[in-house]
Amino acid sequence: PGKDVYALTVIQLATVAVICWIGAAPDGIQAPLDGEVWFAIIFTAVFATALAFFIQTWAQSIMDASRVAIILTMEVVFAALTSVAVGQEVLSLQVILGGLLMLAAMLLIEWPRKDSTPEEVIYEPMAH
């Protein structure tokens, strides 16, 4: 909370760009010649990366840090489900049990206790 969401998003995007350039450098960096490829690159760069990073950073800025950490642990489960959905992973007993354990852990941590009172959460406006 209280951080500049736009600045953090730019830092995330710059970091990803540098890491990708470093990873691509050994094979040689060549610009695609096809217009459809450029469209796909720009579309995914804007919507799947920049917009997604911005929304995630904004959501993190208005949520409790422990709740954000719990939600982000679910990325592994979502990645596994996506991999199964597109046929790159087999839905094995190990994958199912791992996902169920992560869900159970998240529910256990988030489940309200009988002796606890709800925390007062103060939301700060998004910094510009």
Image (cartoon, grey):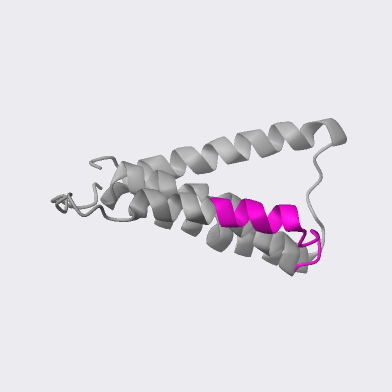
Is 48 placed left or right of 112 in the picture? Answer: right
Is residue 88 shown above or below 70?
below
Picture quadrant of residue 118: bottom left
Picture quadrant of residue 45: bottom right
Q: Is residue 96 magenta?
A: yes
Is 34 placed left or right of 96 in the picture? Answer: right
Residue occupying the far front of the picture: 114
Does residue 82 show up?
yes
Does residue 45 show up?
no
- The region drawn magenta spans 86-101
Residue occupying the far right of the picture: 27
On-image quarter of the N terminus: top left
Is residue 19 shown above or below 98?
above
- Which residue is depicted at the point 80% across and 55% down? 32
Q: Nearer the viewer, residue 80 or 42?
A: 80
Is residue 87 shown above or below 116?
below
- Which residue is depicted at the point 40% across and 51% down? 108
Q: Position of residue 82 (x, y in %)?
A: 67, 63
- Which residue is depicted at the point 76% across and 67% down? 86
Q: How many marks?
A: 0
Q: Nearer the viewer, residue 19 or 109?
A: 109
Is 126 placed left or right of 72 in the picture? Answer: left
Q: Position of residue 66 (x, y in %)?
A: 34, 43
Q: Nearer the viewer, residue 74 or 127?
A: 74
Q: Position of residue 109 (x, y in %)?
A: 37, 48
- Which residue is depicted at the point 76% across and 69% down? 36
Q: Position of residue 30 (x, y in %)?
A: 81, 45
Q: Is residue 97 magenta?
A: yes
